[in-house]
């Protein structure tokens, strides 16, 4: 089993910044990819950014230039630096990991519990 724990959310004024962290723990052999999703009220969950084991990144168009994803493979941790925050960035941000474990040969998807980001003056 793999557990993901996010941190770093909070209330921030427009134009502000936050750094989200997500640490994975458990019976992990390796984590192939990690990503951040978000879900605003009454909207579907959407991919914000993802990063491969080799640090290849992908961000959705609405956050390019403002959000940056990174990871520390030694710590099984992924980060999301979010700058120039806008009210429309308000959402619960979820961490996802695609991980190989000692429980079987196939990678599985795991989710964190989410961290709230609220952008408001």
Image (tube, grey):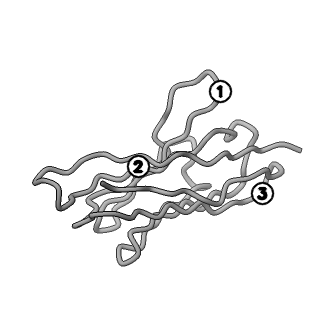
Q: Residue at x 63, y 63 (%)?
A: 19
Dot placed on the residue nearer the N-terminal end, 2 or 3 = 3
Q: Position of residue 41 (x, y in %)?
A: 65, 27
Single out the residue that lies furthest toward the top: 42
Callout 2 secondary element: strand
Mark whose residue sits in front, 3 or 1: 1
Residue found farthest to the right: 121
Residue 35: give x, y in percent of width and height. Answer: 42, 52
Closer to viewer: mark 2 or mark 3: 2
Residue density around tag 1, few if under 14, some if 14–19, many if 20 or more, within 10 Å:
few
Residue position for label 3: 16
Secondary structure found at label 3: loop
The residue tagged 1 is 41
In this rendering, the answer to whether 62 lies above or below 2 is above
User: Of the residues under marks 1 and 2, which one precedes in the sequence?
Assistant: 1
- Rendered view: 60 above or below 32: above
> What distance separates the C-alpha of mark 3 from that of mark 1?
21 Å
The residue wearing badge 2 is: 96
Residue 63 lies, with reference to residue 21, above or below; the image says: above
Residue 63, position as x, y percentages in the image: 57, 47
> Left or right of 8: which side holds 36?
left
Residue at the image position 27 percent from the left and 64 percent from the top: 28
State how far apart marks 1 and 2 are (Cα): 19 Å
């Amino acid at each position: 089993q793999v557990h993901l724990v996010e941190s770093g959310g909070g209330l921030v004024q427009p134009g502000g910044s936050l750094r989200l962290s997500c640490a994975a723990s458990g019976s992990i052999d390796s984590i192939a990819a990690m990503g951040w999703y978000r879900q605003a009220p009454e909207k579907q969950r959407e991919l914000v950014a993802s990063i491969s084991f080799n640090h290849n990144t992908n961000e959705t168009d609405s956050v390019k230039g403002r959000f940056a994803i990174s990871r520390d493979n030694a710590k099984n941790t992924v980060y999301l630096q979010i700058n120039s925050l806008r009210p429309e960035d308000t959402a619960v941000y979820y961490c996802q990991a695609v991980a190989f474990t000692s429980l079987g040969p196939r990678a599985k998807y795991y989710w964190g519990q989410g961290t709230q980001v609220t952008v408001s003056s």
